[in-house]
Image: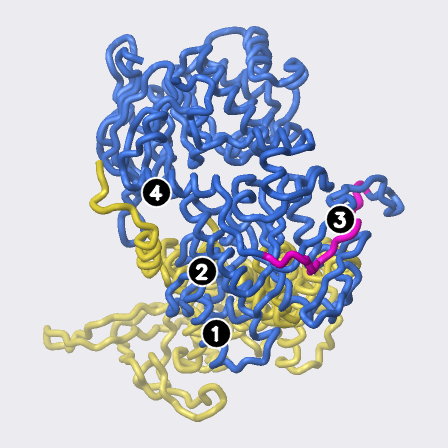
Amino acid sequence: MTDKPILRVSNLSVDFPMHKSVLHAVKDVSFDLHRGETLCVVGESGSGKSVTARAILQLVAKPGVITSGQINLASESGEIDIVALGNSGPAIRQIRGRRIAMIFQEPMTSLSPVHTIGHQIVETILLHEKISKEEARKRAAALLDRVRIPNPEAALDRYSFEFSGGMRQRAMIAMALSCNPEILIADEPTTALDVTTQAEILSLIRELQRDRGMAVLFITHDMGVVAQIADRVMVMFRGEKVEEANVFDLFARPQQAYTRALLGSVLKLETPAPRPTRPVAETPIAQINDLALHFPLNPGFFGRPTAYLKAIDGISLTINEGETVGVVGESGSGKTTLGRTLLRVYTPTDGQVNYRRGDGTTVDIASLGKAGMKSLYGEVRMIFQDPHSSLNPRMTIYQIISEPLRTNTDMSEHQMMDRVQELLTRVGLPADIGDRYPHAFSGGQRQRISIARAIAVRPRLIIADEPTSALDVSLRHQVLDLMRDLQSEFGLSYLFISHDISVIRYFCDRVAVMKNGRIVEIGDVAQICERPEHEYTRTLISAVPRPDPRLRADAPA
Amino acid sequence: MTLEKPFNEDDLLDQQINAGQLQAAGQWAMVWNKFRKHRLAVVALFVVGFIYFVALFAEFLAPYDPGKFDPRYTFAPPQGIGLFVDDGAGGSHFQPHVTGFDIVLNPTSFRREFTPDPSQVIPIGFFVAGQTYKMWGLFETNLHFIGPLDPSQPMFLVGADRLGRDLLSRTIHGTRISMSIGLVGVGLSLLIGMILGGISGYRGGMIDRVIQRVIEFIRSVPTIPLWLGLAAAMPKDWPPLQVYFSILVILSLIGWTEIARVVRGRFLSLRTDDFVIAARLDGVSEFRLIMRHMMPSLYSHIIAAITLAIPNMILAETSLSFLGLGLQPPIVSWGVLLQDTQNLRAITQAPWLFVPGICVVVAVLSLNFLGDGVRDAADPYAK
């Protein structure tokens, strides 16, 4: 790492001309990348980290333009300035793929669904090298083997949709490596993957890098991933480089206020939040017994299904009053479906959900009629994962928040206006934003609006479906703390669904681990996180990247 | 690179809210902004606006009544407008005018031959008194936008037809019928299409399947023979107005299928959107859910569907009338006017009879461009 850098980026600026103004996505950023090192670019959404990465390959999306700066790539005959090459023509194509390769966040959209994996890799090889088709195919098989895709010969003839997310990302990496690039740019390559898959991909990238002495520019928002993979870290904030340091130094001694705040919000999630004390005698608010939801598959000729997709396969779970029960699982485990079934978005095929109402009577949600459900919508509420799609873009904030009041109470318009203002203040937003539309707000603000809608009618149980996973880290614990405050204020119970074990540990009292529609383990949060009993839970927890580089094998003593 | 002040999360929140102010515009403002970028569509919007303006003020804009005929001027060619009149003393003065004709009856071909006669100056002007008419059937007036100062003098700006009727006046009156057929016909299609498409998309299941098969069946029937059959079933002695409305019904019977499909598709995808589920979990009634939460997302798509359906209606009416199965004289529509172009004589002797055809092309093209623009702008939240 002492020699000349392979890539020198100096004073890079990228602008996006908007409707009336200019957005400076990257402002005057400079950094070096050396052979054999991994430079992590970390930042929250809108920090310009992806744009920087794309600028290196001249792939900035329209209407973005590189306004100034140089990107110098070292080669035998001196340095090539990539900025001067323009974004098309043979010169830049010689560099793309051959010398600098890139892998993206979403492997499904980066692979063509109409060509086989093999075809795509062979094509990439043939584009850059003059070898025969058979040789190229042999090389492709070797590459797939290298990224540990089982049975590489057969995998060559399969299509991307036949692969799982992790396998697709492996195939993408194989394709990126096909021409022995000197630099690999990885733009959030594991964000769309489950933690266990993420761990495999990260170790694969690290290993490949060591083997080939590649330089890796790794873009991520996840401090845990940074701690695991980086040699050096560059922190970005709103288009500017905030700090650049060795990974161990950065975590131990962050120099800048922003870095400290960022690390602080990550580390805060590492320790459980203080919990309100709860009565010793637990009164259950909802008891789920053997709940099942099976979707029929392949209906045969006479409409008789030949198989069932068991989205929920016999789940029993009790939620006590004032308690936060977490449900954790990877994608496809049925956790979101469980949450939705509890509110009868889907009607369960079997089982009961005995819900104790505010007046002490118990009803079975699983078999409740339309009218019965209607009376429950005020008591049991839901917070959705994606604050962009859960707020109607064509309604104002006031209309959105007042909707449950309109249907569940008989408040006058005037009372509702007061109540909405009160709610907005309660969730930490200005009270006078009622006449704005959702698109005027950021993700965190929208999630606060969602929460205001959920608590508008004094609910007793809230089903929170990944309420923080679409948010930046620094916003996550803010939203969780808000939910926590509301819990002590109104005596709420939460069913908290998440794929992120650190959020669960921070927020929940008990946790259920789900896999393939079943609960594999359930217990106290501390016990599950520290002494998991089930094999799957252990894998899940150990796969979560901890934001502490000292836990790494190559950490200095 | 350092930040001027320590990072503070509340600060960030404030900044985000202030940044939000810039784009706090409602959805229609966003649609308009996006539409404006589509230059061709903006031009088309003006053309369409002009055509509908003509349709609305047809009586006032047309120099004559569409039925007024003068056998002396059968197939009179278009007259050019001159601006200056020679006053005979070497000078000239400003006076808009058309030139009269020297009419000779050709004894071999029994045709009238028109030669412009510069000595016959017919002064014309704007806002002149002409034939009396009832504006919108409400009040009587004789004011015309343009016409000869002496109403008994001939003025054929785009020529005359085989009965010596002014083609300009007839085309202007035809605009009203043809464009309104498009609008009312689409209105009717929209009503049927939205109801059936809405039910189909929201309810799903058996109802959906039945409605979709019906739509497929209707669309598989070749349209021209179907129209021919339905139009032929209309009694010949019906009054023109009744014929007009039955043609509307016939056109809408096919036109609704396209709109029903658009509405159904949107409903299907909306039904599972988070914000619709959220509204359902707010306890919103089904009716309110459809009208208040789902419909607003459809408005822009429906407007786009309408703009694209109108030209089809206009073309359909034109083809039917051209074949003599649609509207019948004395109703004047572009299609009815084009009936006169069915023989060779029209092409050789009076090419100006194609003017209504040009109108059809212009109207259909601009409506299509407009529809394209609206469709692109329809969803300001896409991308």
Amino acid bearing label 1: Arg
Q: Nearer the viewer, residue A21 or B153?
A: A21
Q: Amino acid at mark 3?
A: Ser
The residue where tag 3 is placed is A316
Instruction: Find disc 1 in the rendering and name its residue.
Output: A419
First in sequence: mark 3 or mark 4? Answer: 4
Question: In this structure image, what is the colour of chain A?
Answer: blue
Which circle, 2 or 3, is nearer the viewer? 3
Of all chains, the one bearing label 1 is A
Which of the chains is yellow?
Answer: B
Q: Do the residues at pointers 2 and 3 share their chain?
A: yes
Alpha carbons under labels 2 and 1: distance apart: 19 Å
Circle 2 crowding by C-alpha within 10 Å: few under 14, some 14–19, many from 20: many
Location of residue A57 (image quadrant): top left
Q: Are marks 4 and 2 on the same chain?
A: yes
Determine whether A65 is above or below B371 in the image.
above
Q: Are marks 3 and 4 on the same chain?
A: yes
At a point 46% along the width and 80% down the height, the residue shown is: B70
- Give amino acid for label 2: Pro
User: Looking at the image, which is closer to me, A217 or B35?
Assistant: A217
For marks 2 and 3, the one nearer the N-term is 3
Q: Dot 1, crowdedness within 10 Å: few (<14), some or many (≥20)?
A: some
Q: Which chain does tag 3 point to?
A: A
Read off the magenta span.
A278-298
Which circle marks residue A261 in the picture?
4
Q: Amino acid at mark 4?
A: Ala
- Which of pointers 2 and 1 indicates the residue nearer the eye? 1
Pointer 2 residue:
A438
Does the CB distance between marks 2 and 3 fall below 8 Å?
Answer: no
Kindly state the secondary structure of the residue where label 2 is placed: helix
Give the chain of mark 2: A
